[in-house]
Image (tube, rainbow, N blue to C red):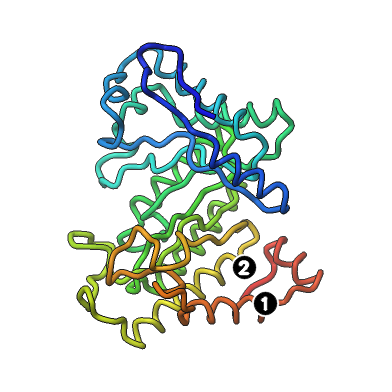
Amino acid sequence: MMLKSSDDTLEGSYVDYDGCHYLNDYAIEHDMAFRGHALVWPAPGKYPDWFEELEGDDMLEEWMIDYIIEVMHEMGDMYAWDVVNEAISNSDADYIKTSVLSGIDDFICTAFSTAKAVANENGWDTLMFYNEYDFESMYGDFATKSDKVYTLMADLVENDCGVDGVGFQTHIDIGFSDENIDGIQDNFDRLADLGLYVQYTEIDVRCGKGPNNAKYTECPIEEGEEWTADMLATQSGIYRKLLNSCIYSANCLSFETWGYTDKYCFLSEPQNGMPFDADYNAKASVTQMINKLNNTPRTANAVEARLAGEFTS
């Protein structure tokens, strides 16, 4: 099914729901949770020309609201939506990214309020998430953006905008320190104090994240070279620690990687941040995570303690 706006201004704007419908129907049939990503994405420089030209248009807010309503009704009942994705600026000097959408007064709260209203009107228990990257730890080079995300979440909660949680993309590298792992845990805790859930939504633990990024280390190997045993061990340890932080946080609902194999991934060699290699062989990361899950108590008392925030590693 193809949907097209009847407004001439949006001619050529299409939304194809067929593939998403199939996935959501499959998830419902097999009692699986399905997340929607994303209703609103303020992405400067990544919009088509016709959308960029809408900046300052009085109808833009109405179109955003209508789009959210249409897409949610078309998709139906879902476990969760990333209502707004990556709205916080990476610049220390700025707060919200400047984009076509940022010209809408309080567009983030409006998006969440609209999405929550659609869910409530249909009797859906859909969770509404804000999704972000490079903010995961409260400490070090991540601290400034982390605090900006927290400020935004506190504002959305105070104004009853309808936000339920925060998605931690977690595109990180093998230089990610134990201090930053602790910083994720502390970030989980302060968001829990706001009454918010957290989810790991796009994890990869790669070798470097490219030049000119002070938050991350450079990759010590070149394209075509294999990862060393020490590098694989470091990667697996980080995956295990991330999983551990979710298991022992009462408000952490989900642990998702950004794919599973290096063969089909947006990362290029030698970054290779997935748990399985390009030949579908499980790396040490898989063994570490399975061992962690197998050694996690699953009795009724242990689950109750975890949900009460009383179960610690």
Quick check: marks 2 and 1 in contact, CB under 8 Å?
Answer: yes
Residue 222 higher or lower than 135, as above or below = below
User: Label 2 is placed on what type of residue?
Assistant: Ile
Q: Tell me which numbered mark, 2 or 1, is placed earlier along the sequence.
A: 2
What secondary structure is marked by label 2? Answer: helix
Give x and y (percent) for residue 181.
45, 69
Give x and y (percent) for residue 300.
81, 69
Q: Nearer the viewer, residue 116 or 6?
A: 6
Q: Is residue 110 in view from this perspective? A: no
Instruction: Name the residue at 40% across, 37% down.
Output: 41
- Classify the position of the C terminus by image quarter: bottom right
Instruction: Name the residue at 27% across, 72% down.
Output: 270
Instruction: Name the residue at 46% across, 61% down.
Output: 259
Residue 282 higher or lower than 122, as above or below = below
Rendering quarter of residue 295:
bottom right
- The outermost residue toward the front is 1
- The outermost residue toward the right is 300
Measure the alpha-carbon separation of dots 2 and 1: 8 Å
For disc 1, the marked residue is 296
Give x and y (percent) for residue 293.
63, 75
For disc 2, the marked residue is 247
Instruction: Name the residue at 65% across, 34% down.
Output: 76
Tell me if 208 is positioned left or right of 278 in this view: left
Q: Pointer 2: residues within 10 angstroms few (<14), some, or many (20+)? A: many
What secondary structure is marked by label 1? Answer: loop
Q: Nearer the viewer, residue 307 or 74?
A: 74
Residue 202 higher or lower than 273, as above or below = above
User: Label 1 is placed on what type of residue?
Assistant: Thr
